[in-house]
Every structure is written in C-alpha cells, then in structure tokens.
Image (cartoon, rainbow, N blue to C red):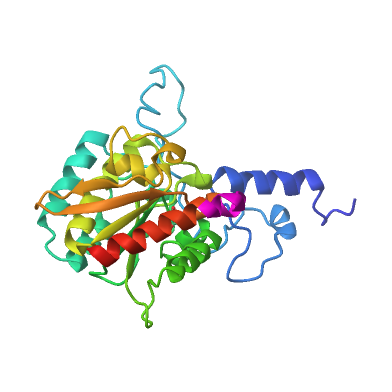
Amino acid sequence: MPENQTSPEQLRAVLQWYADMGVEDVIGAEPSDFSTWANRGPVSAPQAPRKAPAPPPGLGQTQKASTPQRSAPSPVSGLEAPMPTDEAIALAKSLAASATTLTDLRSAIQGFDGCPLKPGARNTVIDDGIDGAPLMVLGEAPGRDEDRIGKPFVGRAGQLLDKMLAAIGHSRFEDEMASAYISNSIFWRPPGNRTPTKAEVAICMPFVWRLIELAKPKVIILVGNTPTQALFDGAPGITRARGLWREHQTSDGQTIPALPMFHPAFLLRQPLQKRLAWADLIAVRKKLESA
Ligand code: URA
C-alpha cells in the first residue's frame, strides 16, 4: 500500500477512538476527509466535539493507591465527579421553588449542573408550545434530533405526536389550534437513547413538577412508562396504565387529571396499537371539554 494511504485498520482505529470519546454523529457542519487524519500526526478533532460523559459515581475512587501514574491528569471540563444524587435533588428542589415564572424556571434548568447526563448532551431540552395551554404532554427524554435542535419531540415520534394532537384539535404551534404545551421527564439526552435511570429522573423531577405547577394545564397526557412512573410512583407498566385516568396534585393545591398513553415512538413500531391511542385521545378531548 502506498505510504500516504490509510489502511482499513488505521481507519477503524480512528473511528473507534471517536466512538470511545462519545462522538455519535458522523455529519459535521464542514466537510472533512477523515481518511487523511491518521497520517496527520496529532489528530485534530472536528469542531466542538461532544464532551465525554462524566464517569459514574465512584469511578476513579476505586483505583488502587499503588497504581503507577506518570503524571496527574489535567482537569478536563465535563469529567469532574458528578454531584451526589441527593445533593442534586436538593439543589433542583430549591432552584425550582425559587422560580416564580416559566421564564425563571427555564433559566434555572439551563444553569443546573446536577444531572450527570448534561456533560454528554449538546443542548438542554426543556419545553415547547404554548405557555399556559390547557393541554400538556409529558414525554420521556430528548432523543438525537431533540438534542441537536434543542426542542422536545422534533423527530419522527414528535411528528406523529403533532398529528395525534391535531386529530383532537390541539397544536403546540402558534396556529389556529394553538393549545398544547410539551415537555419531558428529563432535559438531557441519555447516551444512545437509553431509558433514563431512576436517579436521573429523580434529579429532574423537581423541575418537572414546577413546570406543571407554573404552566397550569387542565389535562396532562403522559406518553410512555417514564413520565407515568415519574409522576405516579408505583404505577404499572404502560400497557396496564394506559387509558386509566389519574390525578396529579401540585404542591400549590391544583388537581390535574393525567392520562397515560402509548408513546408515539411505540406507535410507530406497533401501528395496530393506534386504535387504543385513538380511544385515549378521544377521552382527552372529552376531559378538556368538561374542564
Ligand atoms: N421522545 C420523548 O419522549 N421525548 C422527546 O422529546 C422525543 C422523543
């Protein structure tokens, strides 16, 4: 092979290095011929690589004292030890309680560093839609598209959600049906779109409860297991929970009916279940008419 050509093994090694660093997207803003990188000497990373996620609690502390170390690692932003979960929950509660408007609350969430998912995410994804709308939809977590754009439910599942809402006369957009507000159970994308852990959800919930309190919806739709179990501790899985009304009590005394439904991403995979989702949407429409 000519000296200036990159072998498949070298290419694989470069790709593996990027994958290990947490790079998941292979399309950047600028075109780049990365087949030449392996021959360039020190590899310069593409613009703004994502920070590696913080290590899980305790990682690093278990290293034996006798392990030889050449030099102390330099501090790298985003690799600091995560805040202990209890401390993060307490901080989230106090920040949430001090926010008296949705705008204040959004700034508090943006500035909050207690969730271990934040260093690995591109954006803090908080909410979208109409402040003070009668209908609120609570989802699970931002996915890849949401993380990239910074808004909830903008990918394929979000497009289906918009169609489902439109079918009962609601929309998150400033149009003639404008009447829906959308958020999630957590505000940062879990790596690889895995289900968020209980601790990650618990850390974000004080903010979610306050979002609900300040947004004052008349009805909440909970799409999927995560928001259903986050709002109602001990709720069964979504197949049993869906279609059964529950009541969410806010700490300032509002009682808000909440209906668990199938997640639109699940409906994309299981279109036959749309029949049940339709029945749930009709129930939501009726509840809003009588609210
Ligand atoms: N799924 C969710 O639960 N929320 C989003 O924002 C996107 C997909």
Question: x, y (%) of residue 171?
Answer: 39, 72
Count up the numbered dots: 0
Question: x, y (%) of residue 197?
Answer: 39, 37
Whether the magenta-drawn stretch holds residue 291 is answered as no
150 displayed left or right of 247 = right
**Can I make out residue 63 in this image?**
yes
Question: x, y (%) of residue 131?
Answer: 25, 70
Q: Work out whether residue 251 or residue 42 is closer to the camera in this orientation and state it.
A: 251
Tell me the magenta residue range. 267-275
Q: Residue at x 67, y 66 (%)?
A: 32
Q: Work out whether residue 24 or residue 105 is closer to the camera in this orientation and state it.
A: 105
**Can I make out residue 182 in this image?**
no
Question: x, y (%) of residue 136?
Answer: 31, 61
41 displayed left or right of 285 = right
Q: Work out whether residue 75 or residue 115 is closer to the camera in this orientation and state it.
A: 115
Q: Main secondary structure of the magenta part?
A: helix
Examine the rendered structure and indicate whether residue 178 appears above or below residue 73: below
Q: Work out whether residue 276 or residue 182 is closer to the camera in this orientation and state it.
A: 276
Examine the rendered structure and indicate whether residue 246 appears above or below residue 127: above
Q: Ligand 1 is found in which quarter of the picture?
A: bottom left
Q: Residue at x 71, y 52 (%)?
A: 38
Quadrant for the C terminus in the image: bottom left
Q: Residue at x 35, y 64 (%)?
A: 285
Q: Residue at x 66, y 53 (%)?
A: 41
Name the image quarter holding residue 66.
Answer: top left
